[in-house]
C-alpha cells in the first residue's frame, strides 16, 4: 500500500520516516500492487551550547536509509489484503548531539515495519468504505493528532545508561518509529461515527518497553472531528523502567479532542484535554490552537497560535512529530536537547509560514516556555525562535535548512541546564530527504 505524499507538505524528514516511504512500482494491475520503498535522510547539526554538562558545543551528523517492500492484493470483492516489510540502517557521526543522547559512534540495521492488514472495501455498506480495517505486526500507530500516542520514540544512542538504551543513532532524525507488536481494529471508515481498538507493545528500552491498550471513538463531518481517547497501561519492563515510568502500570488516560475548520473557510482549530489517573495523583495536559490562511494574499501566509500546558508530573507517553515542525516537539532546541520535554510547562506558540513558490515553504516559529513547578526540578523557562525553509526540489529531493535561537532564563549554575551561561544559543541544521 502506498500512501501519497505532497511535495509541499513534507513536514520534515522525521515525519517522512514515520509514514510510508516513497515507492517505485514493481508490479500493478487492477487487483495487485507491489512497490519497492526507499527513503534516505541526512542531516548536519551544530549547537554552540550543550545541555549534558559538557562545554564547547557540538557538531554532528545523522543519517538513515529506510528500504523494503509494500503492497496490496484485492480479494475478488472480499476486501483488500495489505502489508509492508522494511528495514532501517542508521548512524550518528561527529560529537554526538547537544544533549549527549548520542556519542557519534552509533551504527545499527534493524527491521522497522513488518505488518499485515485487511480492509473490508464495500463488504459492509453500513460501516462505509473500508469500514473494517484490521492489522497486526510491527507498525506505526497514532491516535488522534499524536498528542498522546504518535509513534515509538525516542531514538537514543550510547550516551544515556552506558549505552543500554541505544537504538542505533539518528536521534534528531528519529530513524525508528514502529511499535514492536501491535493489533489494531478500526471500525466505521473515515466519516460519521468511527472508532478503534488498539493493543501495542514497545521494544524501546527508553520507553521501558511499555505495553498499552487503547480505544478511540470519533465523529467526523464537514466541520471537523470530535473524539474521545482512552489508554490503559498494562505493563512495563522493570529492568528499564524509572520510578516515574513504573506508574504506567495500571494507569488510565482519558482525553476529549477535536480538530477542523468549524465551517470557517481558510481556518483550522484544534484542542485536546487529557488527564492521567495515576497512583500518586492525577495529572493533566491540554492545548488550544487556531490557525488562519490568508489565501488571497501574496504567498498565502498562514498564522497559527497555540497554548499548551502540561502539569508537573505529566507523562508524555508516545507523543511525537505528527504534522511538521512544532508538533509535538515544540522548539527544535527545547524539544530535542534542552527541555522541557512535554511535561511541567506551559507553552505559548506563534507560527507563521508562507509559500513564495509552489515547492518552497518558509516559516518562523516562536515559543515561550514557562516552568509549572521548580520544586526539585530544573527551571526550564526559555524563549526560542526557529526560522526554516522547506524546499521540494523535485519528487526525489527535499532540502530543509533551519536556524534556531534559544535563550533560557537559567543556566546550569542557577537551576537550568545550559552549559556556559544563559546567553542565546545559536543552533543550525540542514536536513536532506531523498525518497525514491
Image (cartoon, helix red, strand yellow):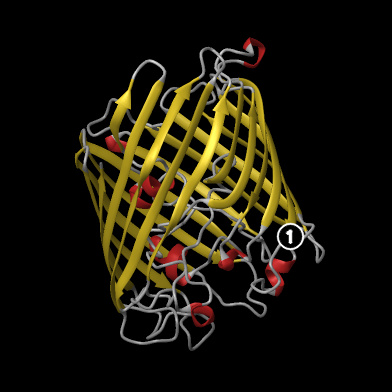
Identified at 40% across, 74% down, the residue is 102
Q: Is residue 313 left or right of residue 85?
A: right
User: In the rendering, at what x and y percent does residue 313 appear?
Assistant: 69, 65
Q: Which quarter of the image is occupied by the N terminus?
A: top left
Q: Nearer the viewer, residue 248 or 201?
A: 201
Q: Quadrant of residue 262?
A: top right
Q: Is residue 177 above or below residue 188?
A: below
Task: Find disc 1 in the rendering and name its residue.
Answer: 235
The part of the image, by quadrant, that contains residue 277 is bottom right
Q: Where's residue 50, x and y in %?
A: 38, 79
Instruction: In this rendered view, identify the residue nearer to me: 122 or 278.
Output: 122
User: Around disc 1, counting alpha carbons within 10 Å, would you say few (fewer than 14), some (14 to 19), or many (20 or more)?
Assistant: some
Element type at marker 1? strand
Seen in the picture, residue 50 relative to 433 is either above or below; the reply is below
Query: Can you say which quadrant of the picture contains the C terminus?
Result: top left
Which residue shows up at 49% across the image and 78% down it? 163
Q: Is residue 213 above or below residue 74?
A: below
Regarding residue 229, the answer to whether it shows in the image is no
Q: Is residue 337 visible?
A: yes
Residue 374 in picture, x, y percent from top left: 63, 75
* In the rendered image, the vertical position of residue 206 relative to residue 74, given as above or below: below
| The quarter of the displayed image where residue 196 is located | top right
Who's the residue at 30% across and 45% down the image? 38
**Is 196 placed left or right of 163 in the picture?**
right
| Percent position of residue 344, x then y | 62, 65
Amino acid at each position: 500500500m502506498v500512501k501519497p505524499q505532497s511535495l509541499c507538505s513534507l513536514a520534515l524528514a522525521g515525519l517522512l520516516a514515520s509514514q510510508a516511504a516513497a515507492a517505485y512500482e514493481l508490479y500493478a494491475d487492477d487487483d495487485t500492487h507491489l512497490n519497492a520503498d526507499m527513503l534516505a535522510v541526512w542531516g548536519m547539526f551544530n549547537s554552540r551550547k550543550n545541555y549534558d554538562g559538557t562545554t564547547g558545543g557540538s557538531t554532528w551528523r545523522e543519517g538513515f536509509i529506510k528500504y523494503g517492500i509494500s503492497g496490496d492484493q484485492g480479494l475478488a470483492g472480499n476486501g483488500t489484503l495489505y502489508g509492508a516489510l522494511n528495514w532501517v540502517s542508521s548512524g550518528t557521526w561527529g560529537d554526538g548531539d547537544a544533549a549527549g543522547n548520542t556519542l557519534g559512534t552509533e551504527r545499527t540495521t534493524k527491521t522497522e515495519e513488518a505488518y499485515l492488514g485487511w480492509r473490508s472495501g464495500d463488504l459492509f455498506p453500513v460501516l462505509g468504505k473500508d469500514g473494517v480495517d484490521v492489522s497486526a505486526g510491527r507498525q506505526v500507530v497514532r491516535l488522534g493528532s499524536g498528542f498522546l500516542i504518535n509513534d515509538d520514540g525516542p531514538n537514543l544512542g550510547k550516551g544515556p545508561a552506558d549505552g543500554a538504551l541505544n537504538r542505533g543513532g539518528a536521534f534528531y532524525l528519529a530513524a525508528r518509529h514502529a511499535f514492536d507488536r501491535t493489533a489494531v481494529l478500526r471500525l466505521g471508515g473515515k466519516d460519521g461515527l468511527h472508532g478503534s481498538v488498539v493493543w501495542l507493545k514497545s521494544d524501546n528500552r527508553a520507553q521501558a518497553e511499555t505495553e498499552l491498550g487503547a480505544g478511540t471513538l470519533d465523529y467526523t463531518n464537514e466541520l471537523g472531528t470530535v473524539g474521545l481517547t482512552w489508554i490503559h497501561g498494562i505493563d512495563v519492563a522493570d529492568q528499564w523502567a524509572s520510578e516515574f515510568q513504573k506508574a504506567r502500570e495500571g494507569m488510565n488516560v482519558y482525553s476529549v479532542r477535536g480538530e477542523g475548520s468549524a465551517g470557517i473557510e481558510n481556518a483550522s482549530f484544534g484542542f485536546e484535554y487529557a488527564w492521567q489517573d495515576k497512583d500518586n495523583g492525577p495529572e493533566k495536559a491540554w492545548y488550544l490552537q487556531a490557525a488562519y490562511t490568508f489565501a488571497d494574499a501574496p504567498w498565502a501566509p498562514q498564522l497559527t497560535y497555540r497554548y499548551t500546558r502540561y502539569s508537573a508530573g505529566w507523562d508524555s507517553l508516545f507523543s511525537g512529530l505528527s504534522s511538521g515542525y512544532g508538533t509535538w516537539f515544540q522548539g527544535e532546541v527545547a524539544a530535542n536537547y534542552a527541555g522541557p520535554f512535554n511535561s511541567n510547562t506551559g507553552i505559548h506558540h506563534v507560527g507563521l509560514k508562507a509559500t513564495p513558490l509552489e515547492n518552497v515553504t518558509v516559516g518562523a516559529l516562536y515559543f515561550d516556555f514557562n516552568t509549572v513547578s521548580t520544586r526539585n526540578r530544573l527551571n526550564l523557562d526559555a524563549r526560542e525562535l526557529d526560522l526554516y525553509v522547506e524546499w521540494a526540489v523535485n519528487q526525489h529531493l527535499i532540502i530543509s535548512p533551519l536556524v534556531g535561537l534559544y535563550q533560557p532564563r537559567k543556566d546550569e549554575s542557577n537551576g537550568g541546564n545550559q552549559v556556559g551561561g544563559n546567553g542565546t544559543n545559536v543552533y543550525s541544521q540542514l536536513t536532506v530527504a531523498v525518497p525514491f
